[in-house]
Image: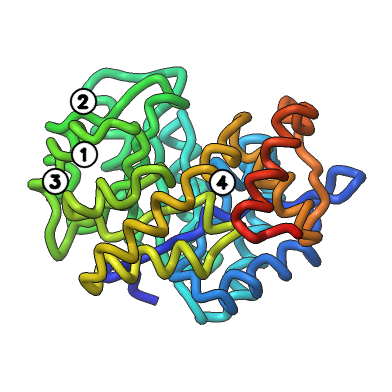
Amino acid sequence: MDIRDITGSIVALVTPFDADGHVDFDALGRLVDFQIEQGTDGILTLGTTGESSTMTDEEDDAVCSFVVERVAGRVPVIAGSGSNCTETMLRKSLSYQNLGADGLLIITPYYNKANEEGIYRHFATVADAVEVPCILYNIPGRTGCSISVANVERLAAHPNVMGIKEASGNVSYAADIAHCLGPDFKMFSGNDDMVLPLMSLGASGVISVWADVQPALVHEMCRAYLDGDIARATQIQIEGIPLVRALFSEVNPIPVKEALSQMGMIEANYRMPLCPMADDTRARLVEAMKGAGLLA
């Protein structure tokens, strides 16, 4: 499936684990079906929210293969193949492409950081080698390094780089790269609390944690904005802020997995070093979910 024209809400899907710490494929299948039934525009698997950093290569491949097969072409599937090691990112990218992923999310080289040319080559190495479109992932708060405006400009010209997930939380940076946007290069907000500010600069939608629990609403917000109903989109964004804040009251994906557990969709199990929520933040999350109509 060609993802170059994708717009709207792409869910950053969690990876559910059972009580023994294994991937819970039954729950994963339910999550995939729930997302598609609720109108999500695309599914990102094995991203930050998917806890792929704690999973083995075999588990990553199994999850990617399962999601692709379960989706069965109903919506695009993007796989997070990022690594701080370029060769590892290349190997994972080729593997997920061969497993049927429609696109790849590739991240800056965290910990290593690298210089300007090294960061460019890190992304270009994968983009040169794969046949499916790549989305750059800029999240300096987690990686310790950012994609410079100059490197965005260079990479946006690559025929196999179709966009950027911008999660710096810096609207000024988003404005600085907005001139790169066009038919061949898109921006997606990586922050659920500032989807509309980035869409006002030309972003095509969001890669969303919020959509794990309210996929129909996040889809509606993006669709309303793209269709010119700015008032409705603004209402959804503003009214959603308390829940979004609660979903990030501890490090992602701890709260969103707890939220899905409260909804009866998965068990709130994690891979170390992630662990269950503290009592106070869990209580605030439950209250926000009640306010959003997700819990009685």
The amino acid on which the numbered mark 2 sits, given as a three-letter code, is Glu
The amino acid on which the numbered mark 4 sits, given as a three-letter code, is Leu
How far apart, in angstroms, are the residues tagged by discs 3 and 4?
28 Å
Looking at the picture, tell me which residue is in the foreground, 111 or 283.
283
Residue underneath mark 1: 174
Label 4 with label 1: CB-CB less than 8 Å: no
Looking at the picture, tell me which residue is in the foreground, 22 or 6.
6
Residue underneath mark 3: 178
Q: Nearer the N terminus, badge 3 or badge 4? A: 3
Label 3 with label 4: CB-CB less than 8 Å: no
Q: Quadrant of the C terminus?
A: bottom right
With 270 as the anchor, is 242 left or right in this view? left
The amino acid on which the numbered mark 1 sits, given as a three-letter code, is Ala
> Which of the two marks, 1 or 2, is nearer to us in this view?
1
- The count of marks equals 4
Q: What crowding class fits label 2: few (fewer than 14 Cα within 10 Å), some (14-19), or many (20 or more)?
A: few
Q: Nearer the N terminus, badge 4 or badge 2? A: 2
Q: Position of residue 88 (x, y in %)?
A: 50, 38
Residue underneath mark 2: 117
Tell me the element at label 2: helix
Q: Position of residue 44 (x, y in %)?
A: 50, 57
Q: Which residue shows up at 34% across the image and 50% down it? A: 195
> Which of the two marks, 4 or 2, is nearer to us in this view?
4
Residue underneath mark 4: 243
Q: Which residue shows up at 55% across the image and 65% down it? A: 99
> Quadrant location of residue 248?
top right
How far apart, in angstroms, are the residues tagged by discs 1 and 2?
21 Å
Label 4 with label 2: CB-CB less than 8 Å: no
Label 1 with label 3: CB-CB less than 8 Å: yes
Residue 95 visible in the shown view: no
